[in-house]
Amino acid sequence: QVQLVESGGGLVQPGGSLRLSCTISGSIFRIVSTGWYRQAPGKERELVAAVTSGGSTDYGASVKGRFTISRGDTGNTVYLQMNSLKPEDTAVYYCNVRGYLTAATWGDYWGEGTLVTVFS
């Protein structure tokens, strides 16, 4: 059983910063990528940032230059540093892990989400 637990969401004013954390627990044979997605009310879930096991990163166009994804030393934690926050960044942010649960079983795992609200 793989479990993802997000933390760090909250209320922040425009221009402020937040740091989200995601702790990954359980047994995964091989993680291929970890990432953050978000979903605002009435909108589809979208990629915020992702990092592969090899260290390659990908960012959504609207957050490039403002958000940074990183992994903890053990690989069981992934962070999202969010700077220069805007009201349009308001959303529920979800942690995602993709990889092999066993050598032959692919898995796509999601946390329950953490709410980020940017308001003036």
Image (cartoon, helix red, strand yellow):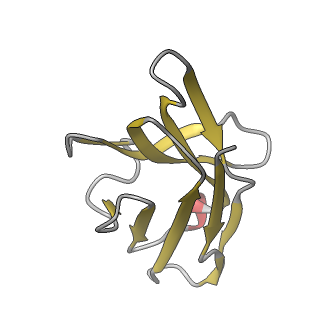
For the point 55% across and 45% down, the residue is: 27
Looking at the rendered image, the quarter that the N terminus falls into is top right
Residue 40 placement, left or right of 16: right
Q: Quadrant of residue 109?
A: top right
Q: Quadrant of residue 80?
A: bottom left
Looking at the image, the residue that sits furthest to the top is 104
Looking at the rendered image, the quarter that the C terminus falls into is bottom right
For the point 54% across and 63% down, the residue is: 22
Q: Quadrant of residue 103?
A: top left
Is residue 6 at all visible to an observer of this figure? Answer: yes
Q: Between residues 79 and 62, which one lies in front from this camera angle? A: 79
Expressed as whole percent of the image width and height from the top left, the position of residue 105 reads 55, 19
Q: Between residues 39 and 30, which one lies in front from this camera angle? A: 30
Q: Between residues 16 and 73, which one lies in front from this camera angle? A: 73
Q: Between residues 82 and 105, which one lies in front from this camera angle? A: 105
For the point 50% across and 40% down, the residue is: 28
